[in-house]
Image (cartoon, rainbow, N blue to C red):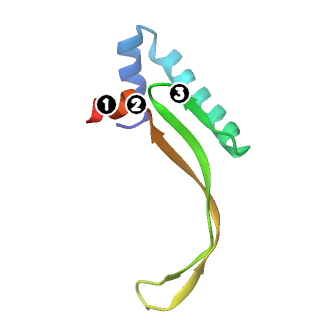
Amino acid sequence: MNKQELVAAMADKSGLSKADNEKFVKAFEETAKEVLGKGESIQLIGFGTLSVSERPARTGRNPQTGKEMQIAAKNVVKFKPGKALDETLN
């Protein structure tokens, strides 16, 4: 499902216009970037938690040449599903 399909599905469920739902999705994206950029987490009870985790530097291999190379440390976003979402999927 892409962004436009998500907006359309949300419009069907909420009864709001697609334009209003698109504004909501954009606002959520911007807010999530700000919050996660500060290193904080976002917890949506029943759905899940988005958090920032640090991936340490490591040595990897170039698959074409087989030579070792250094992969820099970086921050990544992790998603942990909530209990309700986990139960729905399983």
Q: Residue at x 38, y 27 (%)?
A: 84
Q: Secondary structure at mark 3?
A: strand
Residue at the extreme top of the image, as rendered: 15
Judging depth in this view, the residue of 41 and 7 nearest the camera is 41
Disc 3: which residue: 44
Q: Would you identify the image quadrant in which residue 85 lies?
A: top left
State the CA–CA distance, disc 3 to disc 1.
15 Å
Judging depth in this view, the residue of 30 and 88 nearest the camera is 88
- Residue 31 shows in this picture: yes
- Residue 5 shows in this picture: no
Q: Secondary structure at mark 2?
A: helix
| Nearest to N terminus: mark 3 or mark 2 | 3
The amino acid pointed to by label 3 is: Leu
Whether residue 65 sits left or right of residue 28 in the image: it is: left
Q: Would you identify the image quadrant in which residue 23 lies?
A: top right
Crowdedness near tag 3: few (<14), some (14–19) or many (≥20) residues, C-alpha within 10 Å:
few
Q: Which mark is residue 13?
A: none
| Nearest to N terminus: mark 3 or mark 1 | 3
The amino acid pointed to by label 2 is: Lys
Q: Which mark is residue 87?
A: 1
CB atoms of marks 1 and 2 within 8 Å: yes
> With respect to residue 70, does 28 lie above or below?
above
State the CA–CA distance, disc 3 to disc 2.
11 Å
Disc 2: which residue: 83
